[in-house]
Each structure stands twice: as structure tokens, then as C-alpha cells.
Amino acid sequence: MRLTHFSDYALRVLMYAAARGDNLITIEETAELYGISRAHLMKVVNQLTRAGYLKAIRGRSGGLALAKRPNAIRLGDVIRATEPDFALVECFTADNNCLITQRCRLRGALNKALTAFIQTLDGYTLADLILSPKDFGIKPAA
């Protein structure tokens, strides 16, 4: 299984916001930090804000901050909110035309693996991933 760039970027934004603590982050600085398109990152941030993981503070000195404590943000929930689907193979889709679906055992095995993957992520929170600002190349304030 491979996560989309969208989910990858969502986790990275949350990790950066957690590392910054009470300091607000911006889309611009985060895009520059990770070398990600600002336009794409804006979509990610909008989704995270709608899902309740980030809060946006408007105004000249505004920015983004975590909307929940890091230990309340389960990785599995973030992935569920950011992945468009979990159709690992054709038989997981609504337009399945696979000839052997009725007798195939692959679907059950893959579904079990997918469930284990998500359950494993549910066992971790953003708090488990927190790095220090210096890990992002940010020098401490003097």
C-alpha cells in the first residue's frame, strides 16, 4: 500500500505544527521548509482545518496551529480523513469487473492487511512523532 502525497504532506504539516508548539506556522514557511507546492499545501491545510486538526488564525500576524493536543490526534484518523479511498485492488471498487471476485480469496487477505495497517496507525498519535524545532532547522529564539 502506498499513501498519497496528500496524506504524507498532511502528516508533515501536523508534525511541524506540533514542533512549533505555541508558535503559529504559515503555509508559505511550511511549503518552503518541505519544498512542497504552496497551492498543493493550501489544499492539505484546508482539509486538516475542516477535519478539526488545525485552526487558522486570521489577520496580519495570523497563521496555523494545532486545534487539538498532539496526544488527541490519532494517525489512523488523519489517514482516514486524507486518503481518497482504500481500494487496494479492483475488487474493492464499486465498478469491479474482475472475473474471479466471487471465488477469490485475495480480497479477504488484503482487507485483513488493510485493517491491520489502519489499526496499527490508530495506536500512534501525533505526540509520538513530535520533533524539536531544531530538527526542522529552526534556531532557538535569542
Image (tube, rainbow, N blue to C red):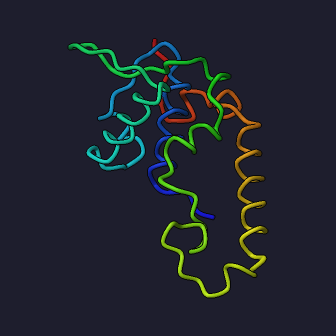
Q: Position of residue 50 (x, y in %)?
A: 40, 29
The N terminus lies in which quarter of the figure?
bottom right
Along the viewing direction, whichever of 108 and 115 lies nearer the viewer: 108
Q: Residue at x 68, y 22 (%)?
A: 71
Q: Residue at x 31, y 39 (%)?
A: 42
Along the viewing direction, whichever of 17 and 116 lies nearer the viewer: 116
* Count of numbered marks: 0
Q: Position of residue 15 (x, y in %)?
A: 55, 33
Q: Position of residue 89 (x, y in %)?
A: 60, 72
Along the viewing direction, whichever of 65 and 73 lies nearer the viewer: 73
Q: Which residue ends up furthest to the front in the rendered image?
A: 102
In the drawing, does residue 51 fall left or right of residue 119? Answer: left
- Toward which corner of the image does residue 58 lie, by quadrant? top left
- In this rendering, the answer to whether 30 lies above or below 63 is below
Along the viewing direction, whichever of 44 and 34 lies nearer the viewer: 44
- In this rendering, the answer to whether 111 lies above or below 90 is above
Q: Residue at x 54, y 27 (%)?
A: 133
Q: Residue at x 46, y 30 (%)?
A: 51
Q: Position of residue 126 (x, y in %)?
A: 64, 31
Q: Which residue ends up furthest to the left in the rendered image?
A: 60
In the drawing, does residue 33 fall left or right of residue 21? Answer: left
